[in-house]
Image (cartoon, helix red, strand yellow):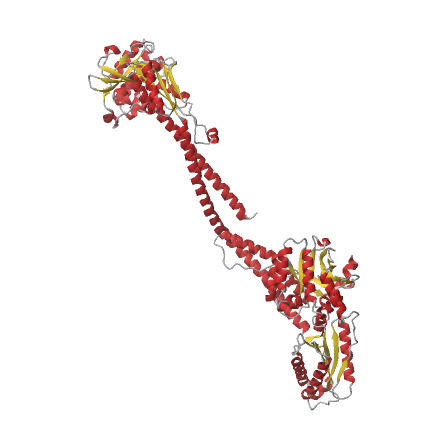
C-alpha cells in the first residue's frame, strides 16, 4: 500500500473520530441542555402552581381543578400533589405517544424528564409537595432535530475537511510520487534526474541522493559506451584508409547471408593491388600509402550507388566490395571501369606488368554461408590475378541454386497456411550455462502444409520474393496472441519481427488493435526481437513501438548485434531486455571490448546472449568472458 | 487574649466528643478576614449553641431567635451590593448584618444543628402589614397540622402564628424537604437554596 493511501486512511479515520467525538459531545450537551430545560420548566410550573394552590386553602376539589387546568393547557407528563405523609392527594398522568421521531432514536437515546417539587401551603401550614414532570415528546422532537442538523452540518464539514486535507496531502506527497516514479525508473534501469528538488527537507535529501546515484550509473554507461565505440573502431577499422577490416566483414556478412534477407543476392568483389613492394621501392612508402587512400576513395565512390554496400580492406593489398542487388553484368562493367580508372591512379613510374589491380567478381546468394562467399571471392580474385594482360577482371559464376519447389508451389503452400491458419511455432531454448536454467524460449514461425512442416529458414525466402512475408508475420503475431500454445503458459518467449514487417505502414495500427484485444492478459511474457541495425538507425521511430509494447508489458530484444563502432545511446533509449550476438562475435572480440559492452549493458540491466552456439567447446571461452546465456544447437546437448 | 484561649480550651475539653457548629479554622479565618469582634461573635455563638444541646425545643427556639436578632438589619443592596442574596450563617454573623432571609437562614441551620427536625421548620414568605412589605420568617411546626411558632427578626418573642396578626402567610419553603425529593431524581432544588448549600459547604464567610 502506498504512503498516500496509508495517510489517506489515517487522516480519514482521524477526521472521522474527531467529528464523531465532537458530534457526540455536542449531542450530549444538547441532550443535557434539553433535560435541564425540562427541569427548569417543571420547576417554574411547580413553584407558580404551588403559589396558586395556596389560595385554595387546602380545598382538594379546588386544588384538583387548578391542577387540571394547568395540566390540560401545558405539555406535562405528570403533575401530582402528595401530602405531608407521602399520600397522593391528586395526580394527573399523560399517556401521550412520541410522534415524528424514529423509534430507534427513542430506544437508544433515553430522556428521563426530571421531576420538580414545590411546597404547597394552606395559610401558615404546609399541606404537601407538588411534583411536576414535563412531557418528553417535545424534548425528543427537539433533540432529534438537533441531531439531524448536527449530522448534516458535520457531514458537510467532514467532506469539505476531507477534500481540503486530501488536496493538502497530495501537495505534500507530490514529491514522494516523483520519488516513487524515479525509484521505479531506476529499477527499470532508466535514468531520470529530478531537476526540481522538493521543498520538504527529508524528500529533498532523498531526491538529491537518488539524483547522484542515477548520475553515477549514467556516467558508467556513458563511459562504457565511449570505450566500446573506441574499442570497436580500433578493432574494426583500418587506420590508414578508415575502411572496415576483415574482422568486421566476417561479423557483418551474416546480416546479408540470412534466410530472411530482404535483398537475396548481390556482388562480392575482391580487389587486390599486386606489386606493392615494387611500388614502395619505386615511389616510396608515403606515395604508396596515398595510392591506397586513392583506391579507397575510388571504391567508396562506386559503392555509394548501392544500398547497404560495404567497402572493406581485407589486408595490406586487398579490398572487398559488397554490392547488394548488383547484377553480374553491372559488376563486370563497374570492375572494368575501375580498372581503367586505376591506370590514372597508378603512376607512370610504375611498371604496369608488375603493379596492377585485379578484380575478382562473385555473385553471392543469401542462402550461402560466410565461408562459401569468402572462398568464392578469393577464388575469383586468384583467377583475376592470373589474367596476363590488362583488364584483370574475373567473374566466378555462381553454381545454380535451383529451388526444389517452384514459386507457384510456394505461393500455394503459404496461402494454404494463411487461409487455414496452420501457422506453427517451433521453440528453441536460451539457457543460462552457469545455472542451467531456461532463460526464455525462442519462438520461430513455421508453416504446416497438409503433409509437411516448413521451418522459417525454408519458407521465408520464397515468401519474401512472393511479397507474402508481411502477411505471415501479421498472422503469426495474431495467432500467438489469440491462441497462444498451452505449453507457453507462465514462460518467457521471444519472437523475431523482421525489418520489412516493421517498416510496413499498417504494422503499428495492426499490432495496436491486436494488443488491445488480446495482450492485456497474456499467459506468458513476450519479448519482441528486432535486428540491432534497425534499432540503431531508427531508435527514435521505434520509440512508438517501444511505448506500445510497454503498455502491455512486452519487452524488446536485440539480435544480430556485431558491436559496430557507433554511439550506443539507443540502448539507453530503448532498454532492450537482452542483446543477442553470434557466438563468433563474442569469441573474436578483445576482452576489453567485451568488458566495455558488459559494463554498458549491466548499467542498464541488459543481458548478453550468444547465438548460433553449435559446439560445447565454445562454452569455456564464453564463460571466461562472462557470457553465460546461449542459444543454438549446444543447448540441446546441454539438455 | 489569654482569656480567649482559656475559654476555647475549656470548650474543647467540655465538648471533646461533640462536633462543633463552627470549626476553629473558620474562627481563625473570620478573625483574619474581619476583626476581633467578629471572632468573638463566633466564639460566643459556639458557646451559646453548645449550651443549648440538652435544652427543650422552646428554649432552643427562644435562645436562637434572641441571639441572632442581635445582629443588625441591613439590606442586601447595602451589604452585598445585590438586590437579593441568601447569605450563609457565617457571612451573616461575621458581617454582623443581614436582611430577613439571612436571619431565617441563620436560625434554621442553628436549630438544625441543635437537633430540631428540618421538616418541622419552614422559610415562610409573609406579608408584613406593619411595614407594608414582603418579609420572611422562620416557622416551627410541632406537627404538620399544628399552629406554627414564628421566629421573626422584627419581634424578640417567639409567638404562635395566631398572635402574629401583623403577618399574612403567602408561601412555605423548606429546602431540605425539596432536596430529599429532588435527590431521588438527581436534580437540583432551587437555585437560591442550592447556591446557599454550596456556599455553606465551602464555609463561605
Please say if A620 is above or below A319.
above
Residue A188 visible in rendering: no
Task: Return the residue nearer the eye: A296 or A354.
Answer: A296
Residue B125 sits in quarter: top left
Please tell me which residue lies in front, A214 or A473. Answer: A473
- Above or below, A56 against A112 in this view is above
Q: Nearer the viewer, residue A9 or A108?
A: A108
Residue A570 rendering spot, x and y as whole percentages: 61, 65
Q: Is residue A507 visible?
A: yes
> Residue at the spot x=57%, y=55% of the render?
A183
Identify which residue, B9 or A241, lies in the foreground: A241
Percent across and percent down for residue A98 are 43, 28
In the figure, is residue A333 to the left or right of A91?
A: right
* Residue B129 position within the rendered picture, expressed as x and y whole percent measured from the top left: 20, 17
Where residue B112 sits, quadrant-wise, is top left
- How far from the left and from the top, in percent, is residue B2? 29, 18
**Residue A504 left/right relative to B26:** right
Quadrant where the image shows the C terminus of chain A: bottom right
The residue sitting at 49% across, 58% down in the picture is: A196
Image position of B29 with respect to A244: above or below: above
Amino acid at each position: 500500500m502506498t504512503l498516500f493511501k496509508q495517510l489517506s486512511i489515517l487522516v480519514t479515520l482521524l477526521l472521522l473520530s474527531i467529528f464523531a467525538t465532537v458530534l457526540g459531545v455536542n449531542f450530549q450537551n444538547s441532550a443535557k441542555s434539553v433535560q435541564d430545560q425540562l427541569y427548569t420548566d417543571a420547576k417554574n410550573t411547580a413553584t407558580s402552581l404551588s403559589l396558586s394552590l395556596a389560595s385554595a386553602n387546602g380545598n382538594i376539589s379546588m386544588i384538583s381543578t387548578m391542577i387540571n387546568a394547568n395540566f390540560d393547557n401545558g405539555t406535562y407528563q405528570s403533575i401530582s400533589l402528595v401530602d405531608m405523609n407521602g399520600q397522593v392527594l391528586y395526580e394527573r398522568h399523560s399517556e401521550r405517544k412520541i410522534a415524528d421521531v424514529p423509534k430507534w432514536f427513542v430506544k437508544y437515546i433515553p430522556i428521563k424528564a426530571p421531576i420538580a417539587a414545590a411546597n404547597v401551603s394552606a395559610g401558615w401550614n404546609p399541606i404537601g409537595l407538588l411534583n411536576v414532570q414535563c412531557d418528553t415528546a417535545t424534548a425528543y422532537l427537539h433533540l432529534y432535530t438537533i441531531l439531524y442538523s448536527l449530522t448534516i452540518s458535520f457531514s458537510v464539514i467532514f467532506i469539505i475537511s476531507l477534500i481540503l486535507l486530501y488536496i493538502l496531502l497530495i501537495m505534500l506527497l507530490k514529491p514522494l510520487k516523483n520519488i516513487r516514479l524515479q525509484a521505479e525508473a531506476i529499477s527499470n534501469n532508466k535514468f531520470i534526474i529530478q531537476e526540481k528538488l522538493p521543498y520538504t527537507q527529508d524528500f529533498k535529501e532523498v531526491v538529491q541522493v537518488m539524483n547522484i546515484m542515477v548520475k553515477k550509473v549514467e556516467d558508467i554507461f556513458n563511459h562504457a559506451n565511449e570505450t566500446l565505440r573506441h574499442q570497436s573502431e580500433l578493432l574494426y577499422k583500418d587506420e590508414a584508409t578508415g575502411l572496415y577490416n576483415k574482422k568486421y566483414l566476417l561479423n557483418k556478412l551474416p546480416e546479408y547471408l540470412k534466410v530472411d534477407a530482404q535483398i537475396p543476392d548481390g556482388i562480392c568483389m575482391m580487389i587486390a593491388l599486386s606489386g606493392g613492394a615494387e611500388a614502395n621501392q619505386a615511389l616510396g612508402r608515403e606515395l604508396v600509402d596515398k595510392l591506397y587512400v586513392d583506391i579507397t576513395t575510388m571504391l567508396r565512390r562506386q559503392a555509394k550507388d548501392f544500398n547497404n554496400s560495404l567497402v572493406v580492406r581485407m589486408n595490406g593489398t586487398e579490398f572487398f566490395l559488397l554490392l547488394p542487388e548488383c547484377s553480374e553484368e553491372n559488376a563486370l562493367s563497374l570492375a572494368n571501369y575501375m580498372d581503367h580508372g586505376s591506370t590514372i591512379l597508378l603512376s607512370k613510374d610504375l611498371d604496369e606488368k608488375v603493379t596492377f589491380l585485379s578484380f575478382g567478381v562473385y555473385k553471392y546468394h543469401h542462402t550461402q554461408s560466410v565461408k562459401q562467399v569468402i572462398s568464392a571471392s578469393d577464388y575469383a580474385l586468384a583467377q583475376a590475378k592470373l589474367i596476363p594482360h590488362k583488364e584483370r577482371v574475373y567473374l566466378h559464376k555462381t553454381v545454380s541454386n535451383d529451388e526444389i519447389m517452384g514459386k507457384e508451389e510456394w505461393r500455394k503452400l503459404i496461402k494454404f497456411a494463411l487461409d487455414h491458419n496452420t501457422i506453427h511455432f517451433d521453440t528453441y531454448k536460451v539457457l543460462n550455462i552457469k545455472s542451467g536454467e531456461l532463460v526464455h524460449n525462442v519462438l520461430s514461425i513455421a508453416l504446416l502444409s497438409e503433409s509437411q512442416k516448413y521451418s522459417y529458414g525454408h519458407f521465408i525466402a520464397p515468401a519474401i520474393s512472393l511479397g507474402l512475408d508481411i502477411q505471415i508475420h501479421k498472422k503469426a503475431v495474431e495467432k500467438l496472441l489469440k491462441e497462444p500454445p498451452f505449453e507457453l503458459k507462465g514462460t518467457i518467449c521471444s519472437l523475431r519481427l523482421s525489418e520489412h514487417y516493421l517498416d510496413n505502414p499498417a504494422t503499428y495500427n495492426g499490432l495496436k488493435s491486436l494488443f488491445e484485444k488480446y495482450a492485456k492478459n497474456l499467459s506468458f511474457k513476450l519479448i519482441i526481437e528486432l535486428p540491432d541495425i534497425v534499432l540503431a538507425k531508427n531508435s527514435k521511430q521505434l520509440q512508438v513501438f517501444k511505448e506500445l509494447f510497454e503498455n502491455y508489458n512486452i519487452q524488446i530484444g536485440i539480435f544480430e548485434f556485431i558491436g559496430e563502432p557507433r554511439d550506443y545511446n539507443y540502448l539507453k533509449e530503448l532498454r532492450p531486455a537482452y542483446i543477442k550476438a553470434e557466438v563468433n562475435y563474442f569469441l573474436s572480440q578483445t576482452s576489453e571490448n567485451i568488458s566495455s559492452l558488459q559494463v554498458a549493458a549491466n548499467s542498464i540491466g541488459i543481458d548478453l546472449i550468444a547465438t548460433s552456439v553449435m559446439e560445447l567447446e565454445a562454452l569455456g571461452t564464453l564463460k571466461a568472458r562472462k557470457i553465460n546465456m546461449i542459444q543454438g544447437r549446444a543447448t540441446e546437448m546441454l539438455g | 487574649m489569654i482569656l480567649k484561649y482559656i475559654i476555647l480550651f475549656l470548650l474543647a475539653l467540655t465538648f471533646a466528643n461533640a462536633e462543633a457548629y463552627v470549626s476553629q479554622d473558620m474562627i481563625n479565618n473570620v478573625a483574619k478576614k474581619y476583626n476581633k469582634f467578629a471572632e468573638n461573635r463566633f466564639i460566643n455563638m459556639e458557646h451559646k449553641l453548645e449550651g443549648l444541646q440538652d435544652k427543650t425545643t422552646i428554649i432552643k427556639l427562644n435562645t436562637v431567635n434572641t441571639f441572632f436578632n442581635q445582629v443588625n438589619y441591613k439590606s442586601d443592596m447595602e451589604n452585598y451590593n445585590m438586590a437579593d442574596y441568601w447569605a450563609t450563617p457565617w457571612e451573616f454573623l461575621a458581617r454582623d448584618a443581614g436582611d430577613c432571609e439571612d436571619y431565617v437562614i441563620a436560625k434554621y441551620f442553628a436549630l438544625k444543628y441543635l437537633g430540631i427536625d428540618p421538616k418541622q421548620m419552614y422559610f415562610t414568605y409573609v406579608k408584613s402589614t406593619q411595614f407594608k412589605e414582603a418579609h420572611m420568617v422562620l416557622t416551627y411546626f410541632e406537627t404538620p397540622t399544628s399552629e406554627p411558632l414564628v421566629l421573626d427578626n422584627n419581634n424578640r418573642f417567639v409567638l404562635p402564628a395566631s398572635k402574629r396578626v401583623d403577618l399574612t402567610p403567602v408561601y412555605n419553603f423548606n429546602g431540605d424537604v425539596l432536596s430529599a425529593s429532588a435527590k431521588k431524581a438527581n436534580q437540583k432544588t432551587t437555585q437560591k437554596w442550592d447556591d446557599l448549600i454550596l456556599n455553606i459547604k465551602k464555609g463561605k464567610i
